[in-house]
Image (cartoon, rainbow, N blue to C red):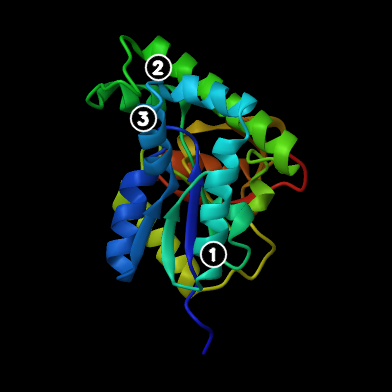
Amino acid sequence: MNRPRTVVLNGDLGSGKTTVSVLLAERLGVRRVSIGDLYRRMAAEHGMTALQFNLHSELDDKVDHYIDQLQHDIAASAERLVVDSRLAWHFFTDAVKVHLVVDPVVAARRVLARPGDAVENYRSVEEAGGDLARRSDSERQRFLARYGVDKADLRNYDLVCDTTRASPAEVVARIVDTLETPAARPAPVCHLDPDRVRPGAEAGDDGEIVVRHQAPHFVAVRGHRRLDAAVRAGETLTPMVLAGDR
């Protein structure tokens, strides 16, 4: 029997990584480690907002070096964990790698609804959405420059789940299913909200839904009939296949 694997969760800002990772750790009975919580504490200690600390980290590589070494050490421990981190998928090579996606407006509304503090505090959905987009781009450029990896490339992950309308419990159930039933096809397995997949003009009507990722959107290139049926049925998570190129 294979040794149970660590699960690492990356995802869009505001996609619910904290809630999902807490529930998943409880479901699996393992310890949860949050690099995001550590990053927020470091931002607070520097007297900076989350965006300011991101920009600071672009100029001061000691921040990333400290966090990277910590993740290396945790990965080397071989303890089975749930890790909430936007770069753990790069360091935990043997883990099950989960990426959460969400509609940007929904993400902005979620972070706006959180209690404000010195690290994150917004006055409107527009302000929150703009800040999230700048933070995400800052991280992506930093990771590309320092590690040569692209967090936006969904082929880096084993499972992609859309949290736009799905409950955290539904997302956890899909992750557990993935752990119990290894994928028969190349990664990633995608469970997306059909209501926000745009039908492509060239999409065929038959068979499984095949989508192309055009961040932050998904466009169907095949499977219009199945996509329409999923929307009419009110599904919040529908299995889809990621096209070979993004």
Q: Position of residue 215 (x, y in %)?
A: 62, 30
Q: Secondary structure at mark 3?
A: helix
Q: Name the residue tied to disc 2.
A: 128
Q: Residue at x 54, y 42 (%)?
A: 227
- Quick check: 224 left or right of 177? right
**What amino acid does circle 3 point to?**
Glu
Query: Going 60% across and 25% down the picture, which residue do you hit?
Result: 138
Q: Is residue 243 visible?
A: yes
Q: Which residue is mark 1?
A: 75
Secondary structure of the residue carrying tag 2 is helix
Quarter of the picture containing the C terminus is top right
Query: In the image, what residue type sits under mark 2?
Result: Ala
Rendered location of residue 113, percent (x, y): 25, 24
Query: Label 2, label 3: how many angstroms apart (C-alpha)?
Result: 22 Å
Q: Earlier in the sequence, mark 1 or mark 2?
A: 1
Marks 1 and 2: which is nearer the front? 1
Q: Secondary structure at mark 1?
A: helix
Which residue is labeled 3 in the image? 45
